[in-house]
């Protein structure tokens, strides 16, 4: 499993979300609905406990805890920016 953060996404977190360089950003899986895609991703500032996937971008440290990586299994999660804001892509 791999976690990737685009430069555009990192800039969005710094400029629009007002995160600061040195912040630790947890990416986690959450239940969002009972539809065809019941799970999605959430983001919050937090300190790592048992990180299983990590990436640094523009002074920000992103990570996923071991209990959340089941959602991407052996794939790659890319966090990018699109017209609507932050976008998550699992490959």
Image (cartoon, helix red, strand yellow):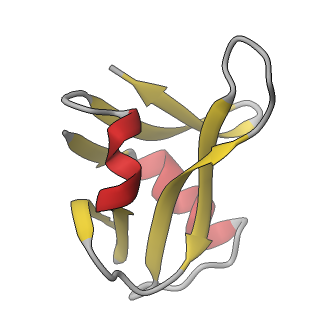
In the visual, does 21 lie left or right of 86? left
In the visual, does 29 lie left or right of 39? left
In the visual, does 45 lie left or right of 17? left
Q: Quadrant of residue 31?
A: top right
* Residue found at x 43% / y 84%: 21
Q: Quadrant of the C terminus?
A: top left
Q: Is residue 9 above or below residue 47?
A: above
Q: Quadrant of the N terminus?
A: top left
Q: Position of residue 47 (x, y in %)?
A: 42, 87
* Residue found at x 32% / y 82%: 49
Q: Is residue 90 above or below residue 10?
A: above
- The number of numbered discs placed on residues in the rendered structure image is 0
* Residue found at x 24% / y 27%: 75
Task: Depth check: give the residue in front, 61 or 43.
Answer: 43
Q: Is residue 25 above or below residue 52?
A: below
* Residue found at x 62% / y 37%: 40
Q: Position of residue 6 (x, y in %)?
A: 39, 45
Q: Position of residue 50 (x, y in %)?
A: 26, 74
Q: Quadrant of residue 54?
A: bottom left
Q: Position of residue 16 (x, y in %)?
A: 72, 65
In the visual, does 83 lie left or right of 26? right
């Amino acid at each position: 499993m791999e976690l990737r953060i685009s430069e555009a996404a990192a800039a969005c977190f710094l400029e629009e979300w007002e995160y600061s360089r040195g912040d630790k950003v947890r990416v986690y899986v959450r239940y969002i609905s009972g539809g065809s895609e019941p799970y999605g991703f959430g983001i919050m500032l937090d300190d790592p406990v048992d990180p299983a996937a990590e990436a640094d971008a523009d002074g920000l440290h992103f990570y996923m805890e071991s209990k959340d990586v089941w959602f991407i299994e052996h794939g790659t999660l890319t966090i990018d920016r699109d017209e609507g804001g932050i976008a998550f892509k699992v490959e």
